[in-house]
Amino acid sequence: MKTPPIGSLVLDWTKLSVTPTNVGGIRKLFDGSTATFANAEGHVTTLNPHETPHPPHRHPDEELIIVKEGTLEVSINGRSGPAGAGSVLFFASQDLHGVRCESDTPATYYVFRFVTQSGVL
Protein backbone atom coordinates (compact mmCIF):
# COMPACT_ATOMS: atom_id res chain seq x y z
CA MET A 1 0.00 0.00 0.00
CA LYS A 2 1.44 3.35 -1.05
CA THR A 3 1.79 5.94 1.71
CA PRO A 4 0.69 9.52 1.07
CA PRO A 5 3.44 12.03 0.23
CA ILE A 6 5.14 13.97 3.00
CA GLY A 7 3.46 17.34 3.42
CA SER A 8 4.57 20.55 5.07
CA LEU A 9 5.59 20.15 8.68
CA VAL A 10 7.28 21.78 11.64
CA LEU A 11 9.44 19.63 13.90
CA ASP A 12 10.08 20.76 17.48
CA TRP A 13 13.67 19.88 18.52
CA THR A 14 12.57 19.34 22.13
CA LYS A 15 10.03 16.71 21.04
CA LEU A 16 12.26 14.65 18.73
CA SER A 17 12.97 11.26 20.25
CA VAL A 18 16.55 10.01 20.24
CA THR A 19 17.29 6.42 19.23
CA PRO A 20 20.63 5.33 20.71
CA THR A 21 23.26 3.88 18.36
CA ASN A 22 26.65 2.26 19.00
CA VAL A 23 28.34 5.62 18.30
CA GLY A 24 25.80 8.16 19.62
CA GLY A 25 22.18 8.67 18.63
CA ILE A 26 19.79 9.53 15.80
CA ARG A 27 16.64 11.63 15.56
CA LYS A 28 14.46 10.81 12.55
CA LEU A 29 12.89 13.82 10.86
CA PHE A 30 11.14 12.46 7.76
CA ASP A 31 11.48 9.71 5.16
CA GLY A 32 9.18 9.24 2.18
CA SER A 33 8.04 10.62 -1.13
CA THR A 34 6.93 14.19 -1.78
CA ALA A 35 5.23 15.88 -4.73
CA THR A 36 8.62 16.27 -6.48
CA PHE A 37 10.96 13.71 -4.86
CA ALA A 38 10.79 9.93 -5.08
CA ASN A 39 12.32 10.02 -1.61
CA ALA A 40 13.15 12.79 0.86
CA GLU A 41 14.99 11.71 3.99
CA GLY A 42 16.16 13.81 6.91
CA HIS A 43 17.63 12.92 10.27
CA VAL A 44 19.88 14.34 12.95
CA THR A 45 22.94 12.36 14.02
CA THR A 46 24.84 12.84 17.26
CA LEU A 47 28.29 11.25 17.31
CA ASN A 48 30.16 10.59 20.52
CA PRO A 49 33.71 12.01 20.71
CA HIS A 50 36.12 10.47 18.18
CA GLU A 51 33.46 8.24 16.59
CA THR A 52 32.39 7.80 12.98
CA PRO A 53 28.92 6.68 11.87
CA HIS A 54 30.24 4.41 9.11
CA PRO A 55 33.19 4.11 6.72
CA PRO A 56 33.48 6.59 3.84
CA HIS A 57 30.95 5.73 1.12
CA ARG A 58 29.35 7.02 -2.06
CA HIS A 59 25.83 7.04 -3.48
CA PRO A 60 24.14 8.40 -6.62
CA ASP A 61 22.07 11.07 -4.84
CA GLU A 62 23.39 14.28 -3.31
CA GLU A 63 23.58 14.85 0.43
CA LEU A 64 23.50 18.02 2.50
CA ILE A 65 24.75 18.21 6.10
CA ILE A 66 24.51 21.16 8.51
CA VAL A 67 26.65 20.98 11.64
CA LYS A 68 24.68 21.99 14.76
CA GLU A 69 27.44 21.58 17.37
CA GLY A 70 30.87 20.05 17.82
CA THR A 71 33.54 19.56 15.18
CA LEU A 72 33.59 17.02 12.38
CA GLU A 73 36.57 15.89 10.34
CA VAL A 74 35.15 15.68 6.82
CA SER A 75 36.67 13.67 3.99
CA ILE A 76 35.69 14.09 0.34
CA ASN A 77 37.48 12.06 -2.32
CA GLY A 78 40.56 11.60 -0.12
CA ARG A 79 40.88 15.23 1.03
CA SER A 80 39.91 16.13 4.58
CA GLY A 81 39.41 19.10 6.86
CA PRO A 82 37.45 20.33 9.89
CA ALA A 83 33.85 21.55 9.93
CA GLY A 84 32.51 23.24 13.07
CA ALA A 85 29.11 24.47 14.20
CA GLY A 86 27.27 26.28 11.43
CA SER A 87 29.26 24.61 8.64
CA VAL A 88 27.36 23.33 5.61
CA LEU A 89 28.61 20.23 3.79
CA PHE A 90 27.47 19.21 0.31
CA PHE A 91 28.38 15.81 -1.08
CA ALA A 92 27.89 15.55 -4.85
CA SER A 93 26.70 12.40 -6.57
CA GLN A 94 29.23 9.55 -6.38
CA ASP A 95 31.82 11.52 -4.36
CA LEU A 96 33.50 9.33 -1.73
CA HIS A 97 32.72 11.02 1.60
CA GLY A 98 32.70 10.48 5.33
CA VAL A 99 32.66 12.27 8.68
CA ARG A 100 34.18 11.69 12.12
CA CYS A 101 33.62 13.55 15.38
CA GLU A 102 36.90 15.28 16.18
CA SER A 103 35.59 17.03 19.30
CA ASP A 104 36.16 15.97 22.88
CA THR A 105 32.40 16.55 23.15
CA PRO A 106 29.65 15.06 20.94
CA ALA A 107 29.03 16.47 17.47
CA THR A 108 25.47 16.85 16.20
CA TYR A 109 24.51 17.44 12.57
CA TYR A 110 21.45 17.48 10.31
CA VAL A 111 21.48 15.19 7.23
CA PHE A 112 19.24 15.66 4.17
CA ARG A 113 19.08 13.42 1.08
CA PHE A 114 16.71 13.84 -1.85
CA VAL A 115 16.09 11.46 -4.77
CA THR A 116 14.29 12.83 -7.83
CA GLN A 117 11.30 11.17 -9.46
CA SER A 118 13.35 10.49 -12.59
CA GLY A 119 15.99 8.66 -10.59
CA VAL A 120 19.65 9.40 -10.29
CA LEU A 121 22.81 8.80 -12.27
Image (tube, rainbow, N blue to C red):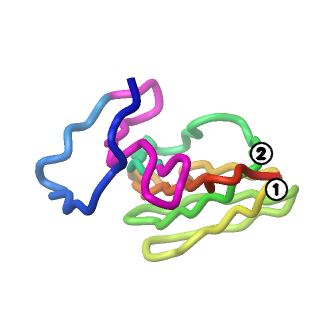
Q: Is the residue 1 above or below the residue 11 in the image? A: above
**Residue 17 image point, x, y percent:** 20, 38
N-terminal of the two: label 1 or label 2?
2
**What range is drawn magenta here?**
20-40
Amino acid marked by disc 2: Arg
Q: Which residue is mark 1?
A: 95
Mark 1 residue element: loop
Image: 43 above or below 3:
below
Q: What residue is drawn where x is 22% and y is 60%?
A: 9
For this orientation, the residue located farthest to the left is 15
Check the picture and name the quadrant holding the N terminus. Answer: top left
Amino acid type at image mark 1 = Asp
- The front one of 54 and 65 is 65
* Residue at which label 2 appears: 58
Q: Residues within 10 Å of mark 2 (few under 14, many from 20)?
A: some
Does the magenta portion include 28?
A: yes
Q: Position of residue 4 (x, y in %)?
A: 33, 41
Could you give the CA–CA distance between mark 1 and mark 2, rounded to whole angstroms? 6 Å
Labels 1 & 2 near each other (Cβ < 8 A)? yes
Q: Residues within 10 Å of mark 1 (few under 14, many from 20)?
A: some
Q: Residue at image x 37%, y 39%?
A: 26
Q: Position of residue 18 (x, y in %)?
A: 25, 37
